[in-house]
Amino acid sequence: MAEPEFALSAFLKVLLTCRIKMAKTQCTVGGRGGEQVLQWRAQQKEAASLEAAIAACRKEEEDEEAKFQKEKEMLRRGEDKEKV
Protein backbone atom coordinates (compact mmCIF):
# COMPACT_ATOMS: atom_id res chain seq x y z
CA MET A 1 0.00 0.00 0.00
CA ALA A 2 3.00 2.30 0.44
CA GLU A 3 3.87 2.17 -3.25
CA PRO A 4 0.59 3.65 -4.61
CA GLU A 5 0.65 6.36 -1.95
CA PHE A 6 4.23 7.22 -2.89
CA ALA A 7 3.31 7.30 -6.58
CA LEU A 8 0.32 9.49 -5.81
CA SER A 9 2.47 11.87 -3.77
CA ALA A 10 4.99 12.10 -6.59
CA PHE A 11 2.18 12.79 -9.04
CA LEU A 12 0.79 15.56 -6.84
CA LYS A 13 4.25 17.09 -6.54
CA VAL A 14 4.58 17.20 -10.33
CA LEU A 15 1.07 18.59 -10.65
CA LEU A 16 1.77 21.38 -8.17
CA THR A 17 5.07 22.19 -9.89
CA CYS A 18 3.22 22.51 -13.20
CA ARG A 19 0.62 24.77 -11.61
CA ILE A 20 3.37 27.06 -10.26
CA LYS A 21 5.06 27.19 -13.66
CA MET A 22 1.75 28.02 -15.32
CA ALA A 23 1.11 30.80 -12.81
CA LYS A 24 4.56 32.28 -13.45
CA THR A 25 3.98 32.10 -17.20
CA GLN A 26 0.69 33.92 -16.82
CA CYS A 27 2.35 36.68 -14.78
CA THR A 28 5.01 37.26 -17.44
CA VAL A 29 2.53 37.26 -20.31
CA GLY A 30 1.38 40.82 -19.64
CA GLY A 31 -1.54 42.35 -21.48
CA ARG A 32 -1.12 40.55 -24.80
CA GLY A 33 -1.68 36.95 -23.74
CA GLY A 34 -5.43 36.44 -23.81
CA GLU A 35 -5.10 33.08 -25.50
CA GLN A 36 -2.41 31.95 -23.08
CA VAL A 37 -4.59 32.97 -20.15
CA LEU A 38 -7.43 30.89 -21.58
CA GLN A 39 -5.05 27.94 -21.97
CA TRP A 40 -3.86 28.44 -18.41
CA ARG A 41 -7.44 28.48 -17.14
CA ALA A 42 -8.20 25.29 -19.05
CA GLN A 43 -5.11 23.66 -17.55
CA GLN A 44 -6.19 24.82 -14.08
CA LYS A 45 -9.62 23.28 -14.66
CA GLU A 46 -8.04 20.01 -15.78
CA ALA A 47 -5.69 20.01 -12.78
CA ALA A 48 -8.63 20.57 -10.43
CA SER A 49 -10.46 17.71 -12.11
CA LEU A 50 -7.45 15.42 -11.66
CA GLU A 51 -7.15 16.42 -8.01
CA ALA A 52 -10.83 15.63 -7.49
CA ALA A 53 -10.37 12.24 -9.16
CA ILE A 54 -7.38 11.52 -6.92
CA ALA A 55 -9.37 12.48 -3.83
CA ALA A 56 -12.24 10.22 -4.94
CA CYS A 57 -9.84 7.30 -5.45
CA ARG A 58 -8.30 7.84 -2.03
CA LYS A 59 -11.75 7.98 -0.43
CA GLU A 60 -12.79 4.78 -2.19
CA GLU A 61 -9.62 3.00 -1.05
CA GLU A 62 -10.12 4.21 2.52
CA ASP A 63 -13.74 3.03 2.48
CA GLU A 64 -12.74 -0.38 1.16
CA GLU A 65 -10.02 -0.68 3.80
CA ALA A 66 -12.48 0.29 6.56
CA LYS A 67 -14.99 -2.27 5.27
CA PHE A 68 -12.29 -4.95 5.20
CA GLN A 69 -11.20 -4.12 8.76
CA LYS A 70 -14.80 -4.19 9.97
CA GLU A 71 -15.38 -7.61 8.39
CA LYS A 72 -12.11 -8.87 9.85
CA GLU A 73 -13.13 -7.66 13.31
CA MET A 74 -16.56 -9.30 12.99
CA LEU A 75 -14.92 -12.63 12.08
CA ARG A 76 -12.51 -12.33 15.00
CA ARG A 77 -15.36 -11.65 17.41
CA GLY A 78 -17.30 -14.62 16.03
CA GLU A 79 -14.29 -16.87 16.55
CA ASP A 80 -13.85 -15.52 20.10
CA LYS A 81 -17.52 -16.35 20.89
CA GLU A 82 -17.07 -19.88 19.56
CA LYS A 83 -14.06 -20.39 21.82
CA VAL A 84 -16.06 -19.38 24.89
Image (tube, rainbow, N blue to C red):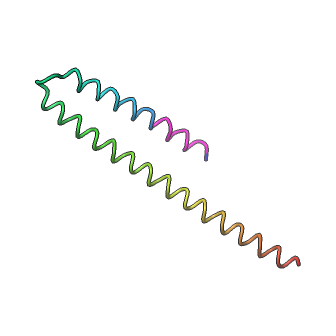
On screen, residue 52 versus residue 63, left or right, reads left
Q: Which residue is drawn at 83% across and 73% down?
A: 80
Tell me if residue 70 comes above or below residue 24 in the rendering. below
On screen, residue 76 versus residue 8, left or right, reads right
Tell me if residue 9 comes above or below residue 78 in the rendering. above
Residue 48, quarter of the rendered image: top left
Q: Which residue is drawn at 25% across and 24% down?
A: 25
Q: Main secondary structure of the magenta part?
A: helix
User: Is residue 7 covered in magenta?
Assistant: yes
User: Is residue 40 covered in magenta?
Assistant: no
Q: Residue at x 55, y 39 (%)?
A: 6
Q: Where is residue 43 in the image (x, y as percent from the top left)?
A: 27, 38
Count of picture labels: 0
Q: Position of residue 50 (x, y in %)?
A: 37, 46
Q: Where is residue 66 in the image (x, y as percent from the top left)?
A: 61, 62
Residue 62, quarter of the rendered image: bottom right
Q: Which residue occupies the extreme right position in the image? A: 84
The image quadrant where one finds the C terminus is bottom right
Tell me if residue 40 comes above or below residue 45 in the rendering. above
- Identify the magenta region: 2-11
Q: Where is residue 12 in the image (x, y as percent from the top left)?
A: 44, 37
Residue 13, quarter of the rendered image: top left
On screen, residue 69 versus residue 37, left or right, reads right
